[in-house]
Structure formats: C-alpha cells, structure tokens
Amino acid sequence: MDEILLMLPGPTTVDPRVLAAMSKAVVNHRGAKYGEILTETTELMSKVFQTPNKSYLLTGSGTAAMEAAIANTVAPGEKMLNIVGGKFGERFMKIAQTHGIDAQELAVEWGTAVTPKQIAEALDENEDIKAISVIHNETSTGVAAPIEEIGKVMKNYDALYIVDTVSSLGGDYVDVEKFGIDVCVTGSQKCLAAPPGMAAITLSDDAWKAVDSFDTNTYYLDLKAARKSGDKNPPETPYTPSVSLTYAMNEALKIVMEEGLENRIARHHKAANASVAAVKALGLELFADEAVSSATVTAVKMPEGIADADFRGTTRDKYGVELAGGQDHLKGNIFRIGHMGCISYKELVQTFAAIGMTLKGLGAIEDAGAGVASITESYL
Ligand code: PLP
C-alpha cells in the first residue's frame, strides 16, 4: 500500500521541505551558526504566537511545555484552577498535583466548552488562585474554548492565564498579546506540521515575575535557565537541543509565514466546516457541541453496532487513511478526524471516501459517496 494518509490530531503530514531541512548537517549547539538559527526560529515562533515577548524552544513534546508552564509559575502549595473538559485538561490537573500545587478543578462536560462566566464565578469564590489553565483546543473531544472572551474576563483578576495551544496554534485564532495570555504553550507536530519532539513556550512580564518569585522544582524544564541561555550571545539552550528538529521548526514556521497566518487559519476553518457538513451528509452525529466545535479536529460518534477496530482498521488497511480513536471513556464510542497542517479538499475527499466505503462495507450506511459529495460542494 502507498503511504498512509495521516488524518490524526497530530502527528500530521510533514512537508518534504521540512524533512529536507532536517537532513542538513548537525552543527555545534554552542556556536554562532546554531545561535543564528535559534534566534530566527524563536522570532518566527513569537510571530505565530502573536506576542512581542520572546519564545523558547524546548526539546520535548507538547507535554514538556505544559509542565514547564505550571512548574515555573505556580509554587508548591499555591492554588491553581484547571478547566477540565477532556484528556488534556486532566493532564494540566495531574501535572499541577505532581508539583505539589493545590490543584482545583472546574469540570465541564466532555464535548462542551467552559464559559467565561463560569471562570469568573470560580475566581470570585477563590481569591487566592494564582493561575488558571485552559486548553484552547481540547483534542480529545473536538471542542474549542473561547480563549479571547476568557482573556477579557481574566483582565479583571490577578491570576495568571495559562493556555495550551498545542493543537490549535497555526490552525485557529491565537493572539497571545491581544487575548492577554500570560503563558502560552504549543507543540511541533500538529497545526505547525513539523515532526514530533519540539515544544515552545512564551511568557508575559507578569508570568516572568511569578517565575522569579520562587525556585522551581523542575530541573530540565527550569525556565530561568532557558532565559539565561537564551540571553547569551550567541543564544543557546541550557542543554543540548535537537538541532535537527530546530531546522525542522524553522522551515515549518517559514512555510506558515509564506502561506500567511490568517490564510492558514481560514484554511483550517474551511476544512473543519467542510468536515462537519460531510459527517452530517453521511448521517453521522458529531460528538462535540457544534457551536464550539474545533477548527482542527472533528469528533464523530461511532455508529451503533460498529466496532472501532473494524472501522479504523478498514479505513487504514484497505483505504490508506489513518483516523484517531476516542480516549478514556470515549474509546470505541467516537472517532476523530484531524484536519491540521497541510489539509485541503484532496485529503478530505480521500478521507470521506474511506469513511463512506468502510461504513457501507460494514452495513452502517447506504450512500457511501455522500461525504465526498458534500466535500466537493464545500470547496466549489
Ligand atoms: N495538549 C493538547 C491539546 C494536545 O492535543 C496534546 C497532544 O495530543 C498535548 C497537549 C500533549 O502533547 P504531546 O503529546 O506532544 O506531549
């Protein structure tokens, strides 16, 4: 079989230009050449975050940046509020607990989004909350949180605003400066379409004040060390970075800029709208509340009586399209279509052809082509 089309919510298909960039000679990570590429890459990163502040690359996956965000800004014993409506909200909660933080949970039903009002109420009840964490795009449920509106509410409180944009940056609207985000984190392998293994973080002045107010209990992810090395001339990272992945991020971010951030986000929204319409055309049901459904991943209820292994096994092995399953209690109950990175009608036509043919083959639907027909209409 030809290469499998990755329609996962990460990792996503990597552009050949990015793969080629990774094959360049590895240079001294404490030399001028690496300093140059690091500077260029972190400057591009700040442009994509839309912040005047510096960004830092961390060799590690998105979770490394999540942990760095919390462990450096909230001291053990301090109170933090985590919005939990899925797997990644839970992860922030667990990371906070791991670091001895007094982790409070604001639970929202999986498939729905938190409202700014709920956050304001929680903050009014707990004046001593040091920070809140929000997952912008809850990849496990296909829900986008209203981070701009939450940012407006957060201006009335001292608590730091920590946002995970691992599966949204470069695919949905994230404006760190305008939304008043204090700590923003992302990963390489989703909408930025670089290989997995790099994470990025940026902090506001208020967040840096919090960093300077205590000694973190993380060593590898100590952001004071990252700042100190980044301020050197030429700039460095505290420990050996993945030089090859830095090349990859550099090239991937250049591709983002060549397309234009606005255009790229519009393209992701178009793919999301087309996917939602095609899901409905096939007679399937969305998992997430449509009003808050994600720009980068569509979660779909598994049709009655269809086993996940048969469904996703067939789309992958017979039709060459890799979809994601559900996580935790959603395992077997939903499947997820990632439409991130280099996604357009071509990939969606192939994906919905595979879904339609598979479901017809399994006896779940009559019209195998309804999804493809809907995609073509959406892109006319
Ligand atoms: N946050 C979100 C919203 C994610 O989707 C993911 C990964 O799927 C992560 C964090 C964790 O990233 P990683 O798997 O790169 O550690």
Image: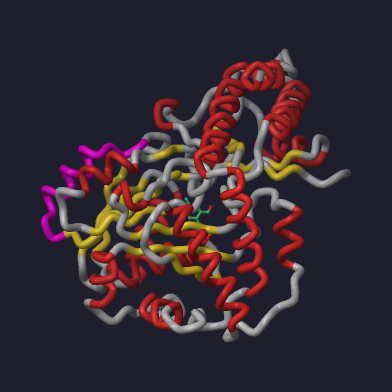
In the image, 362: left or right of 31?
Answer: right
Question: What residue do we see at 75% from left, 31% from top?
Answer: 350
Whether residue 206 is visible:
yes
How many marks do you count on the picture?
A: 0
Residue 125 picture location, percent across and down: 11, 49
Colour pattern of the rendering: secondary structure
In the image, 46: left or right of 216?
Answer: right
| Prevailing secondary structure of the magenta residues | helix
In the image, 78: left or right of 300?
Answer: left
Foreground pick, 331 / 58: 58
Residue 255 picture location, percent across and down: 63, 51
Whether residue 333 is visible:
no
The magenta span reads 113-128
Placement of the N terminus among the 4 image quadrants: top right
Toward the top, the furthest residue is: 366
Question: What residue do we see at 31% from left, 47% from top?
Answer: 179
Residue 139 picture location, percent across and down: 50, 45
Check residue 356 for magenta coloring: no
Q: Is 149 placed above or below 130 here?
A: above
Toward the right, the furthest residue is: 1
Q: Is 242 placed above or below 175 here?
A: below
Q: Is 342 placed above or below 344 here?
A: below
Tell me the quarter of the picture where residue 25 sits.
bottom right
Check residue 120 for magenta coloring: yes
Residue 68 picture location, percent across and down: 40, 69
Foreground pick, 129 / 307: 129
Tell me the quarter of the picture where residue 278 sits.
top right
Q: Is 187 placed above or below 171 here?
A: below
Placement of the C terminus among the 4 image quadrants: top right
Question: What residue do we see at 32% from left, 78% from top?
Answer: 216
Question: What residue do we see at 51% from left, 40% from top?
Answer: 330
